[in-house]
Amino acid sequence: RLSAENSGTAEIRRENELLTGLLQLRAGFEFQTAAATVIARESSEFRRTVTLDKGSDAGIEVGDVVVASGGALAGRVTAVGPESATVVLLTDGESTVIGQLPSAATGEVEGHLATTLPMTQIDASAAISLGDEVVTAGIELGSGVRSPYPKGLVIGQVVDVKRDANDV
């Protein structure tokens, strides 16, 4: 009986830590947020999508940005029903996000089914170091054109640098 109670207590502690983290994450955003749970995953090897348990009834709209519980960018909502939403993940082959390095250099972070996401089209003179954090650039151009992702969301971290001597 004590073992069962101990296991239950450990699960409650884990859930409490998760909810505390979500509240801290929510407090750090200036945008309206809604917590949701992944209820399904795409089974195809060629697509990276998930289904959330919240939809238009909770204020979710197509184009909304989705972040993981740690605050990193996860993807964007592409379809919404009253009680569910489909999200194309950043790792999907059709996803591209403009990322920014600490040196202010930008590049394209391309969705890739592998374990790492390549960032390309970076100025060859940019200083890049292993461990640099890559965030969304949130670029705004004239005439009202802007990135669908807000500035400053964590995309990931530089784990390898390869330079092509022929790049401009």
Image (cartoon, grey):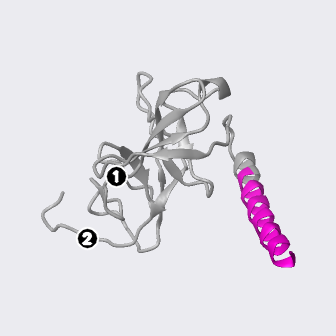
Three-letter code for the amino acid on which mark 1 is drawn: Gly
Residue at figure coordinates x 65%, y 24% from the top left: 57
Picture coordinates of residue 146, whole percent (x, y): 44, 31
**Extent of the magenta region:** 1-22
Q: Residues within 10 Å of mark 2 (few under 14, many from 20)?
A: few
Q: Is residue 150 visible?
A: no
Three-letter code for the amino acid on which mark 2 is drawn: Lys
Residue at figure coordinates x 17%, y 60% from the top left: 167
| Figure disc tally | 2
Drawn side of residue 35 relative to residue 51, left or right: right
Q: Quadrant of the C terminus?
A: bottom left
Q: Quadrant of the N terminus?
A: bottom right
* Residue denoted by label 2: 162
Q: Is residue 66 above or below residue 160?
A: above
Element under disc 1 = strand
* Residue denoted by label 1: 107
Drawn side of residue 88 relative to residue 59, left or right: left
Element under disc 2 = loop
Q: Main secondary structure of the magenta part?
A: helix
Drawn side of residue 162 relative to residue 154, left or right: left
Q: Is residue 16 visible?
A: yes
Picture coordinates of residue 157, whole percent (x, y): 46, 66
Identify the mark at residue 122; answer none if there is no mark. none
